[in-house]
């Protein structure tokens, strides 16, 4: 007998479009505490059951700040590549990897 997939399992298949625009979910409380971004899921099915708080590392924090609902993934990558004088391919991999994780946890949504 098969079971129905959980909501968090449904999100796993989501892929990041470089032409898409993303923003934080409305089902989060986000605060900066001592220079660290802390994310508290407040909606059902957001995050996962093992963690109640999420802290972003320095790289994720820079990307998170750019997820403003106005810029495409490509423009965020281009801006960060210029800002850090880093190869766009590496920035792209980091940004897409983070967005895939955030989408899976339903912490960001496409606009």
Image (cartoon, rainbow, N blue to C red):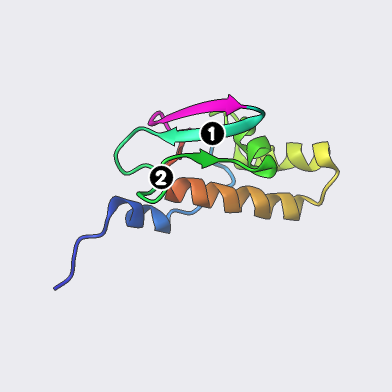
Q: Is residue 49 left or right of residue 84?
A: left
**Does residue 30 belong to the magenta stretch?**
yes
Residue stretch rendered in magenta on the structure = 22-33
Quadrant of image for the N terminus: bottom left
**In the rendered image, is residue 17 in sight?**
no
Image coordinates of residue 38 in percent, x first then y, are 54, 33
Q: Earlier in the sequence, mark 2 or mark 1?
A: 1
Q: Name the residue located 63 percent from the left edge and 33 percent from the top edge.
A: 36
**Does residue 98 belong to the magenta stretch?**
no
Q: CA distance from mark 2 to mark 1?
A: 13 Å
Tag 2 secondary structure? loop
The quarter holding residue 74 reads top right
The quarter holding residue 59 reads top right
Label 2 Cα neighbours within 10 Å, binned few <14 / some 14-19 / many ≥20: many
Observer-nearest of 77 and 107 = 107
Magenta span: helix, strand or loop, mainly? strand
Image coordinates of residue 56 in percent, x first then y, are 59, 41
Tag 1 secondary structure? strand
Q: Name the residue located 52 percent from the left edge and 51 percent from the top edge.
A: 100
Residue corresponding to mark 2 = 47
**In the rendered image, is residue 65 in sight?**
yes
Q: Residue furthest front?
A: 34
Observer-nearest of 33 and 64 = 33
Q: Is residue 70 left or right of residue 86?
A: left
Residue corresponding to mark 1 = 38
Q: Is residue 11 left or right of residue 23?
A: left
Which mark identifies residue 30?
none
């Amino acid at each position: 007998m098969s079971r129905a997939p959980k909501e968090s399992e449904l999100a796993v298949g989501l892929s990041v479009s470089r032409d898409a625009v993303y923003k934080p979910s409305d089902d989060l409380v986000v605060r900066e505490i001592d220079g660290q971004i802390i994310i508290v899921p407040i909606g059902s099915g957001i995050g996962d059951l093992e963690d109640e708080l999420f802290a972003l590392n320095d790289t994720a924090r820079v990307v998170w700040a750019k997820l403003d609902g106005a810029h495409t993934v490509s423009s965020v990558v281009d801006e960060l590549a210029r800002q850090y004088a880093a190869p766009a391919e590496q920035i792209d991999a980091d940004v897409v990897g983070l967005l895939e994780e955030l989408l899976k946890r339903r912490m960001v949504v496409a606009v």
